[in-house]
Image (tube, coloured by chain):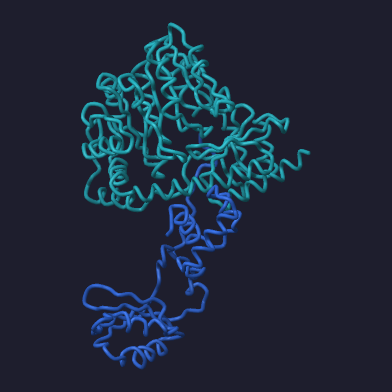
Amino acid sequence: MTDEKDLELLRILEENSRLSTEEIATMTSLAAAEVARRIGALEAGKVIKRYSTVVNWEKAGNGEVSAIIELKVSPERDFGYDRIAERLSRFRQVRSLRLITGTYDLQLIVSGKNMQEVSRFVSEHVAPMDRIRETATHIIMKSYKENGNTFFEQPETERLPYSP
Amino acid sequence: MRNFVSQRAQEIPPSGIRKFFDLVLTMDDVVSLGVGEPDFNTPWNICESSIYSIEQGGTSYTSNRGLQALRDTLSRYLAQHYGVQYDSNNEMVITTGVSEALDIAVRSITDPGDEIIVAQPSYVSYGPCITLAGGKPIPLRCTEKDHFKINPDALAEQITPKTKALIMNFPNNPTGGVMTKSDLAAVADIIIDHDLVLISDEVYSELTYEGSHCVAATVGDLWERTITLNGFSKAYAMTGWRIGYLCAPKELCDAALKIHQYVMLCAPVMGQVGALEALRSAEEDKNSMVNEYRLRRNLFVAGLNRIGLPCHMPEGAFYAFPSVEKTGLSDTEFAERLLKEQKVAVVPGSVFGPGGEGHLRCAYAVSRKDLGVAVERMDRFLQSLK
C-alpha cells in the first residue's frame, strides 16, 4: 500500500522524473536510501509504469498523425469489455484505451505516420474485430495540452527585481 | 518657497532597497531572490471569474465593508480552517491589500505619543505607518537564538506606560519564523497584563510547513484585543489584485471601517470577485503551490548550509534568512557585492530592522532551476572571498 510519502514522491516524479535520488531526498527531508527504496518498491509494484517525456511533436517537426477512435462494443458474458480491451491494447498503434460512458463504450487514441496509416489500421484491424459494432474516427488536428502540460508559450511575466 | 513636505513625511525613511533596485536595472541575467511574491500566476479559475464578472458589468463600488458573499464565505473559511470566529457583518472589512489593513488598523488605535512595539526583523511598513499616525515605533528584537520568535522577557522590557500595542507578523517576513500556540500563550499573558492591543499580520498563514498555523486571536483571551490582518496575495499568488482583510471585535472594526470609508471607500470589486473564487475553488491550487514552496525550501536551505552560509530551517512564509557573519562582510556589503560580482539579488537583513543585521533575505519563491543557479553563484562568491 502506498502512504502519504509515496504519493509525494509520485507527484514529484510525475512532474519531473529526471531528478536525482539525492535531490528528491533533500526536497522531501527523507534519507536518500529511503527514497531509493520507496521508488524501487513503487516500480516493482507497477505503480510507476515507466518514465517518459512529454514531447511537443509538432514543434519537433516529426508530426505523427493521431486520432481519437470511439467504439461501440457488445460486451461478453462474464468478461464485459475486458477481453476485447486487452486484445486492442496489444497494438503498438493504440496509445491510450479507456472504457467510457455515453454513446460509445471504448475510446482509443491511435497514432501513425500519416493519415493513411491510421485509417488503414482502423479499417483493417479495429473495425473488423468481433463484437465491435460501430466506430467513429476523429483525426486530431492540433494538440494544445497533454497530461497537464500546455503547448502554449507563456510570455514571461514582468516582476519587480526587489520588493519588501 | 517654503518646504511643503510635512514633518511626518520627512521623518519616514526612504526604502532601504532603492539603491539595489537602481543597480539591478542596469544588469542582465540576474537571478532575483529579492522579490516578496509568489512566482506562480494566479490560478486561472480565479482570473476567469473576475474577467466574467467584468463582462457582466460588475464594475461598480461595493459596500464599504466589501462584498457580502466574500465576507460570508471568508467568515466560514476562517472558522473551519483556523477555528477563529468573526462575524461577517460586524467584525470584518475587506481592504485594498494587507497594506491598507495595516494602515487603518494602526490609525484606528494610535494617539499622538503612543508607543507601538514592532517585533523585528519585520516587513518595512510597520514603523512608517506608526510614524504617519503620530505614534512612536519601538523595535523589539527577535533573534536567531530564539528562532526569530518573540522572547517574552524582551517584550516585557520594552513596555512603558505609553505602550499601546504590539505589532507582529508570523509566519514572518523576512525570517520565516513562526509562533506556535504555546509561544503565543507566553506573549498573550504579557499583552493582557499590560492592557495592550495586538495587531497580528498573518498574511503568510497558509504558508506554514510544519504543523498548522495558529491564529493569535484564538489564544487565551486575546480575541477581544486583537486586530487580525490577512489577505489573498501570498496564498493564492494574487499580489497584484490587492485584496486583504481586517478582522477585529466590533468596536475596533467600526473605527477601522470609518477610516477605510474615507480613504479607500472599498477594495476593487474585480479583486473581491477573484478572492471569492479563490475561497470557493482554489484550495487545491493553493495546496500544490504551498507544497512546491516546501520542496524548494528544503532544497535551498540545504544548499545554503552546504556552501557555508548557516541558515535555520524557516517554518513558514517563503524566505530563507542565512547568516553572513562568518564571512566578515556586513549584510549590505555582501548583498551589494553578490549582485555586482555574481548577479544574484538578495535583500540585506538590516533593511528589516534590528535583529536583521548580518543576515540576507532570500525569497525562494522562484523556480527550482533558478534556486540551483543562485546557490552555485553564491558558492562561487564565497570561494572568491577566501
Q: Is residue B155 left or right of residue A82?
A: right
**In the rendered image of this protein, does residue A97 appear above or below residue B209?**
below
Location of residue B329 (image quadrant): top right
Could you say where residue B279 lies in the image, as x and y percent from the top left? 30, 44
Residue that extends furthest to the right in the rendered view of this protein? B386
Residue at (69, 37) in percent of width and height: B337
Q: Is residue B343 above or below residue B369?
A: above
Q: Quadrant of residue B226?
A: top left
Residue closest to the far top: B161
**Which residue is at the front of the view, B29 or A132?**
A132
Dividing the picture into quadrants, the one containing residue B164 is top left
Question: Any idea which chain is the cyan one in this picture?
Answer: B
What hue does chain A carry in this figure? blue
Rendered residue at 25%/48% (across/down): B53
Total marks placed: 0
Point out the image quarter for the N terminus of chain A. bottom left
**How far across and down, in percent of the image, does residue B296 sit?**
53, 47
- x, y percentage for residue B208? 44, 39
Using residue A53 as the reference point, say whether residue A136 is left or right of it. left
Front residue of B382 and B351: B382
Residue A150 percent across, percent down from the top left: 43, 63
